[in-house]
Amino acid sequence: MAGPGSGHDVVIREREPADDEAIRRLNDLAFGSPFEGKLIEELREAFIDAVELVAVEDGAIVGHILFSALTTMVDDDAVPTLSLAPMCVHPDHQNAGIGSALVETGLDLARRREWQAVVVLGHPGFYPRFGFSAELASGLDAPFEGDSFMALELVPGALDGDDGLIVYPTAFGLVS
Ligand SMILES: CC(C)(COP(=O)(O)OP(=O)(O)OC[C@H]1O[C@@H](n2cnc3c(N)ncnc32)[C@H](O)[C@@H]1OP(=O)(O)O)[C@@H](O)C(=O)NCCC(=O)NCCS
């Protein structure tokens, strides 16, 4: 898969089980906490990891992104929806386009796998550039609200309706 423009070649590819230890260490480092590494393992164990990519530079994993399935109902119809969480880039490699390449490649793959929408709780200065919108998410009954909770339709109109409900998997430790 295509990588971002930088001095070194960055390859974005799907995660393989042999990557898992490096993915955990990268998340621990980037977030400064073991929470995200554990969340990733729980999402895999629940078999709801749907799109998981790594960014590899000079043989080292320098970025990671996971999209997992959650339950979304709009007017009593299930809408195949992913949660983008977590994602990170090694602190020494940030601001080089790697995070953007992970998001764009992940969204592309999600679209090809026929997912219809994606939600994210994240930096309001980062995700809107990919089309995520807090306004779109504000129409959904979810455990989050405000600028940091954003949604993106991979299929136009997928989240249209009067009543939208998002239920996060138990791995997130939330009650909706
Ligand atoms: C957020 C993160 C994944 C971005 O990865 P990246 O490879 O640096 O991203 P890119 O180089 O593609 O894009 C850089 C842009 O992200 C923005 N960005 C990075 N961290 C940000 C933050 N905390 N809040 C808002 N914007 C942020 C940069 O300002 C930059 O914006 P610009 O293009 O307008 O200058 C990376 O900074 C990271 O891993 N942070 C620590 C973990 C984290 O916060 N994960 C995301 C949880 S929502």
Image (cartoon, rainbow, N blue to C red):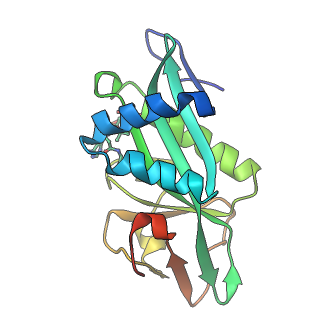
From the viewer's perspective, is residue 157 above or below residue 45? below
Which residue is rendered at x = 47% and y = 31% of the image?
A: 21
Who's the residue at 31% across and 71% down the image? 146
**Front-most of residues 28 and 64:** 28
Q: Position of residue 54 (x, y in %)?
A: 54, 31
Q: Position of residue 143 (x, y in %)?
A: 39, 77
Which corner quadrant of the image does residue 134 belong to?
Answer: bottom left
Q: Residue at x 37, y 32 (%)?
A: 25
Comparing 170 with 66, the one in front is 170
Q: Is residue 116 left or right of residue 66?
A: right
Q: Is residue 16 above or below residue 75?
A: above
Quadrant that contains the N terminus:
top right
Does any portion of residue 4 appear in the rendered image? no
Quarter of the rendering containing residue 91 = top left
Q: Nearer the viewer, residue 27 or 77?
A: 27
Quadrant for the C terminus in the image:
bottom left
| Residue 159 versus residue 20 in the image, above or below | below
Q: Residue at x 60, y 74 (%)?
A: 71
How far from the left and from the top, in percent, is residue 132? 48, 58
* Ligand 1 shown in quarter: top left
Tally of numbered tags: 0
The image position of residue 175, as x and y in percent, is 40, 80
Q: Nearer the viewer, residue 34 or 90?
A: 34
Q: Is residue 30 left or right of residue 23?
A: left
